[in-house]
Amino acid sequence: MATCLLEENEIENSTAELVLAAQSGDREAFGTLVERYERAVFHTALRKTGDADEAQELVQEVFVQAIRKLDQLRQPECFGGWLRSITGRLAINRAVRRRHVQPLENEILETNCLEWDTPSEDALKQERARHVRAGLRRLKSLDRNTLVAFYVEGQSLAEMSQKFASPIGTIKRRLHTARKRLAAELEEFAAA
């Protein structure tokens, strides 16, 4: 027990010495502090953000902030707690900023309007579509009509229930069965 307390005091003294050296402009001392506390700051940031990439960015921000404000730290032995408070404050700031960030116009266009398919991807899509159409033609009319109504025409289960004069549960079962039969047709076509 006494050894453990002695080691903790040595670490605190060592940290305090490193902080004092870093405050005097010793970059190596600050580098040692970063190495010593980086993992703890990361874990704190991860708890606050819930995202590893976000936490890693936050760690960098914390140490940039720490080096800028290091001269304001009056109790060098409290460096770890000071870093935790910076981490918490910056995590809150990031969360608030993230809620109010509007996507850029290019981001909106990329996610909503533009397709970035290569010619080979286009060819693969066309080939898949031909296989699906051929598989649909080989199905019985009830299976084909059920799949077309749901996937091509975009009818809801309620609309299909009225169209086919069947309960919704029956429509769900037909869809499930028709999908399995189409998958089997496509497997046979791919194997041929």
Image (cartoon, rainbow, N blue to C red):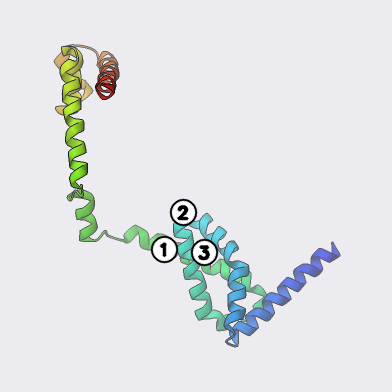
In the rendered structure, the answer to whether residue 37 lies left or right of residue 7 reads left
Q: Which mark is residue 133?
A: none
Circle 3 residues within 10 Å: few <14, some 14–19, many ≥20? many
Q: Which residue occupies 59% across, 85% down?
A: 26
Q: Is residue 75 visible?
A: no
Mark earlier in primary sequence (1, 2)? 2
What is the number of the mark on residue 94?
Answer: 1
Q: Earlier in the sequence, mark 2 or mark 3?
A: 2
Task: Name the residue tied to disc 3.
Answer: 88
Picture coordinates of residue 60 (x, y %)?
Answer: 48, 68
Q: CA distance from mark 1 to mark 2?
A: 12 Å
Location of residue 99 with respect to 32 vertically, above or below: above
Which amino acid, by three-letter code, is at mark 2? Asp
Contact between marks 1 and 2 (CB within 8 A): the answer is: no
Say which quarter of the image contains residue 154. top left
Q: Amino acid at mark 3?
A: Gly
Within 10 angstroms of label 1, few (less than 14), some, or many (20 or more) residues? some
Question: Looking at the image, is 9 positioned above or below residue 51?
Answer: below
Q: Is residue 181 visible?
A: yes
Name the residue that disc number 2 marks.
Answer: 51
Question: Where's residue 89, x and y in %?
Answer: 49, 66
Report the Cα–Cα distance between label 2 and label 3: 15 Å
Q: Residue at x 17, y 50 (%)?
A: 113
